Image: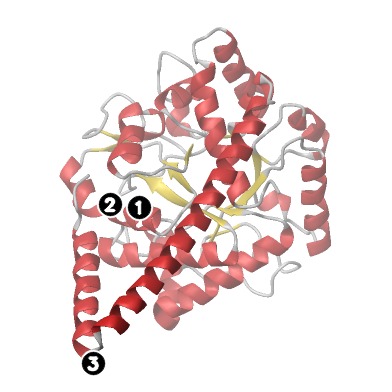
Amino acid sequence: MKKYNLTILIFIMIMLFAFTSCSKNPVKDNNQTEENNNNNNNSNNGNDNNKNEVIDKIEEQALNKLKEMTIEEKVGQLFLVRCPLKDQLDLFMSMNPGGFILFGRDFTDKTEENVIDDIKLYQSKSNIPMVIGVDEEGGTVVRASSNRNLSEYTFKSPQELYKLGGFEEIYSDTIKKSNFLLNLGINLNLAPVADVSVNEADFINERSFGANALQTSKYVKTVVKAMNEAGISSTLKHFPGYGNNVDTHTGSAVDKRTYEDFVTNDFLPFESGIKSGTQTILVSHNIVESMDKEYAASLSKKVINILRHDLEFKGVIMTDDLSMGAVQQLKNVHEPEVTAVLAGEDMLIVTDFEKSYNTLLNAVKSKVISIERIDESVLRILKWKYATKIIN
């Protein structure tokens, strides 16, 4: 992976700070210095050992859970599903969804108690504790806080927050928002928007930070770190970067920018979020010609490989909603659900869960998709759930 400007800048700043700190310290006795170094090394080794023990335990728990799961349960875990209406709930739960996404209709006219009880009901009916997600970006996308029964105010957009008080205001708002969602039982906020947009005419602009790549990277870092501190999972979106493309909810978008444009610009906020510890990344339905002229990014093995190998992301990769117009208009050899999993996606956001589940299950049973490929994604999802205490 190329060393981007942001990485170089941070490295230089760290080295400069270290050099400055050393130059200000008084000269110490050699024995005292050696003793301090030994103490520091012992402390660091202890911290590293503790971290490794936690990682090993999570790995062991996830592997043990994977071994006891049926094929049907494994396939179900790959879906992040639009929350069903009450008459569909039992059907949906029989397919073992990995999680639900709540939309505006799931909050309309409900009290805090109503929402908490709904989510408790979903979790009680699930064999494996679920991801409960929402798009609560602030600004124009506010599924929960738009309900005055739940919140006294609607969360502001990133651009509004920055004008009010810079990154400190963004950090403070993220903590408040995360605690608000966690109190309801929501454990995933599909935010922040990591797209770089400096043109107000862009479709994505008002949802983005609205600044250059370096500033957007700092924004993403601030939000992800605050969300981790609060204890809620984050989703960077929409990889590999939306740019000035049209709305893919209604039709396809073709991005003709060069690969170098992405490396030096759009990838930077995603790299920042990965380094800050984001758990998931959502991939857009844009066709990015410099990466793959044939498939939408969400269905492209080439794009997923860039995210896995070049940006070194080890977490859960998910599609944007596969019911969106941009995907439905495409002609592929397989159904979108099958193409996405073959490409390396871990979770699929869908609306018609029954159809999507049966499509993917049949592909596994007919060996179009290997069980090893399914296990790879389910293991990532389980490790995420154990690491974030979704599964206790």
Q: How many marks can you see?
A: 3
Q: Is residue 105 left or right of residue 164?
A: right
Upstream in sequence: badge 3 or badge 1: 3
Which residue matches tag 3? 26
Q: Position of residue 33 (x, y in %)?
A: 29, 81
Query: What residue is at 81 percent from the left and 38 percent from the top?
Result: 125
Above/below status of 272 relative to 218: above
Upstream in sequence: badge 3 or badge 2: 3
Are the residues flagged by discs 2 and 1 in contact, CB closer than 8 Å?
yes
Extreme-top residue of the structure: 366
- The residue nearer to you, when weighing 223 against 210, is 223
The image quarter containing residue 339 is: top left
- The kind of residue tagged 1 is Phe
Distance, label 3 to label 1, CA atoms, is: 41 Å
For residue 270, the mark is 1
User: Can see residue 362?
Assistant: yes
For residue 383, the mark is none
Which residue matches tag 2? 266
Q: Is residue 272 left or right of residue 52?
A: left
Query: What residue is at 41 percent from the left and 59 percent from the top?
Result: 276
Query: What residue is at 35 percent from the left and 38 percent from the top?
Result: 308
Query: What residue is at 47 percent from the left and 78 percent from the top?
Result: 169
- The residue nearer to you, when weighing 252 against 136, is 136
